Amino acid sequence: MAADNLIDGRAIADQIHTDTAQRVASLKSCGVQPGLMFVRVGEDPASKVYVGMKERTSARLGIHSETLVLDAETTQSHLLGLLRELNADRRFHGILVQAPLPKHISEQIVYSTVSPDKDIDGFHPVNVGKLMLGAKDGFRPCTPAGVHELLIRSEVTTTGAEVVILGRGNIVGKPMAAILCQKDQHADATVTICHSRSKQTAEHCRQADIIVAAMGVAEFLKADMVKPGAVVIDVGVNRVADSSAKNGYRLVGDVDFANVQPIAGKITPNPGGVGPMTIAILMQNTVTAAERAAR
Ligand code: GUN
């Protein structure tokens, strides 16, 4: 079938980048250089790839970025001390501590230590609270905010829509639900979250007008779980063994794309769907932080 139902995340991310680059240029014309600090702890291979992509996009848009690489044995108190110094460092408007962190470090304590004003990940409790309250002056987590923007720019109606979110993580599932259930022109959805202990996941999915798959199970969402015409958003990035691949694995999403794509109304490819949007929102949040600091 012709792939005319694809949601082109790269093209939509590029539209956002164009706007972000203009905002960077006007900050620079006022003498403000937007700055973003990445903090990576340990050698998680996926984190290295993600931070590398974010560094390159920062450079492309004129955002100054640096990456602090700490070894996997770094203590939590050392990391918290560094974050407090970065909170006070006026060169950096955004601070991103890449997850996952080593087991001996509490992500919750780390994300509570980043200043809410520099929390361009939207993980600080103040920003999580603002999202729940529907306040517009916080930072929204990049991946669910990116999915929201994909839906808006693809003209998907969320008002009154039945939305099923697969996954209840703090990075995607929970904030995605909070965004889509707000009383707002581009939200107003009826949201159901399904997770590993849900009993009727397939039945819930079959009722859905929009499905956001973010539970981290390779090709979990099958064609018989999708109502014809439904909008399907695939957030998953899973490694599956593949002896024919050079590195011994390939990446697949949470959606059985080959079989779901022909019946979906609209669907994100993977890669090229949600991933570029996460980075686009990160850059947008960083520039917003810089604009606020410059006021
Ligand atoms: N790991 C996976 N997604 C994210 C994200 O959006 N932000 C951070 N800091 N780490 C992540």
Image: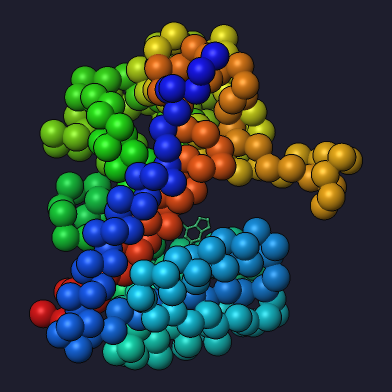
- Vertical position of residue 195 compared to residue 42: above or below: above
Q: Residue at x 66, y 33 (%)?
A: 218
Instruction: For residue 109, say whether it is visible.
Output: no
- Vertical position of residue 99 compared to residue 91: above or below: above
Q: Position of residue 160 (x, y in %)?
A: 21, 20
- Quarter of the view holding residue 163: top left
Instruction: For residue 70, say whether it is visible.
Output: yes
Q: Is residue 71 left or right of residue 106?
A: right
Q: Position of residue 274 (x, y in %)?
A: 46, 43
Camera-nearest residue between 84 and 222: 222
Camera-nearest residue between 284 and 173: 284
User: Given the current orientation, which residue lies at the most extreme front position?
Assistant: 2
- Vertical position of residue 32 compared to residue 168: above or below: below
Q: Residue at x 63, y 67 (%)?
A: 48
Q: Residue at x 24, y 47 (%)?
A: 132
Q: Residue at x 36, y 69 (%)?
A: 61
- Quarter of the view holding residue 71: bottom right
